[in-house]
Image (tube, rainbow, N blue to C red):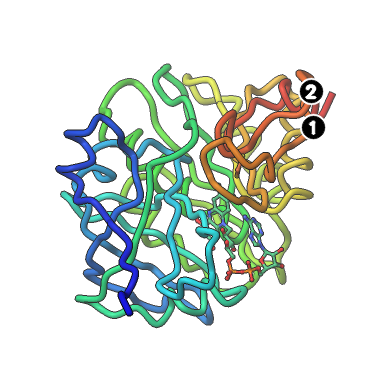
């Protein structure tokens, strides 16, 4: 009897074949629990580190081959050739990833999807709720690294522990955060509205988090005429546009969150009009 093996090309082989991003194996360098059930997983991957723009995501494949579908996670931070994700344990896939140890390997594909646009001079207001935090840490990092006439203000809402503040604080010019006992991100936006209005740079909102939160943010921004880009989280299959599992209603019809998004403007979604 012969045993079936799966061919997993190296990054060099895949790049040479002209087909990248492709599913490939990476080595875990760190995995730590930030707060109850929320982890920061770091792996080494030069290609993803070089190419991951804010809000782009990585598909992570289970080492249990009975779980076929990859799990998508926004890139949270890049340091040299190390890529960090932050995730909450919500099911079997994330429970497995929480057990990964340095030296273990896992298959990934990415970076996938479009990204927040952060090139123009602006005060980027990074509004996140819960596990919407990771892509906005990456946004703060990219804005700081670009070193042009732009800055960022983080506005984060948590259920309880403020697990992302230290990370975004490395890059953002200001960090405001709140937990459920004190209010929500709209409470914070109301509090800092005057400050945003007085700033010489125009505010542009970048947001990721639970759907009701993002709809409330879109509405808040629409009333004030503030440009807004929203990164959606939708249940996904393939992650690159072929299975049509991840569609969302937009003003242009049904679009795919994985390949047309995950970032959409509020006008494109028809939110807050
Ligand atoms: C573009 C994108 C970026 C994401 N980034 C992050 C991130 O940075 N950190 C993070 O913790 N999570 C993120 N998610 C959600 C993450 O992919 C899911 O939590 C994960 O796939 C669940 O896998 P599981 O096997 O543990 O759970 P499952 O057993 O598959 O599901 C458990 C629960 O999670 C919900 N769920 C499953 N998939 C998704 C999904 N794609 N979006 C929302 N809810 C889902 C299910 O409805 C169910 O209630 C992202 C999702 C998308 C689409
Ligand atoms: S996840 Fe397959 S088309 Fe989007």
In this view, the residue farthest toward the right is 273
Report helix, strand or loop for mark 2.
strand
Which residue in the structure is indicated by mark 2?
Answer: 253
Evaluate if marks 2 and 1 touch, with contact meaning CB atoms under 8 Å apart: yes
Instruction: Locate residue 82: give its quadrant.
Output: bottom left
Residue at 57% over, 53% down: 132
Q: Confirm or reject: label 2 Cβ below 8 Å from ligand 2.
A: no
Report helix, strand or loop for mark 1.
strand
Number of labels in the image equals: 2
Residue at 29% over, 54% down: 24
Crowd class of label 1 (few under 14; some 14 to 19; many from 20; radius 10 Å) = few
Residue 246 % position (x, y): 68, 43
Residue 179 % position (x, y): 64, 66
Image quadrant in which the C terminus is located:
top right
Residue 83 % position (x, y): 28, 54
Of residues 217 and 50, which is closer to you in this image?
Answer: 50
Q: Label for residue 179?
A: none
Residue at 42% over, 50% down: 58
Q: Label for residue 249?
A: 1
The quarter of the image that holds ligand 2 is top right
Instruction: Locate residue 121: give its quadrant.
Output: top left
Q: Is residue 147 above or below residue 52?
A: above
């Amino acid at each position: 009897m012969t045993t079936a093996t799966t061919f997993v090309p190296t990054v060099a082989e895949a790049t040479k074949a002209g087909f990248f991003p492709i599913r490939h194996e990476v080595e875990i360098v760190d995995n730590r629990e930030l707060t109850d059930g929320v982890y920061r997983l770091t792996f080494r991957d030069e290609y993803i580190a070089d190419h991951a723009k804010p809000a782009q995501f990585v598909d992570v494949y289970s080492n249990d081959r009975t779980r076929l579908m990859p799990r998508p996670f926004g890139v949270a931070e890049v340091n040299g050739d190390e890529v960090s994700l932050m995730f909450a344990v919500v099911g079997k896939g994330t429970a497995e990833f929480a057990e990964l140890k340095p030296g273990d390997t896992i298959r990934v594909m990415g970076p996938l999807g479009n990204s927040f646009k952060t090139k123009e001079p602006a005060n980027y207001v990074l509004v996140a709720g819960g596990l919407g935090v990771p892509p906005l840490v990456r946004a703060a990092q990219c804005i700081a690294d670009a070193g042009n006439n732009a800055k960022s203000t983080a506005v984060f809402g948590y259920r309880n522990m403020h697990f992302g503040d230290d990370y975004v604080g490395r890059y953002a010019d200001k960090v405001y955060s709140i937990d459920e006992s004190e209010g929500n991100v709209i409470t914070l936006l109301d509090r800092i509205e005057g400050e945003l209005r007085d700033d010489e740079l125009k505010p542009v909102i970048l947001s990721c988090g639970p759907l009701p939160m993002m709809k409330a943010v879109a509405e808040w921004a629409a009333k004030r005429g503030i440009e807004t880009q929203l990164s959606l989280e939708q249940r996904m299959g393939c992650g690159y546009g072929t299975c049509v599992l991840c569609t969302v209603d937009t003003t242009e019809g049904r679009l795919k969150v994985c390949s047309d998004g995950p970032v959409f403007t509020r006008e494109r979604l028809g939110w807050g009009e």
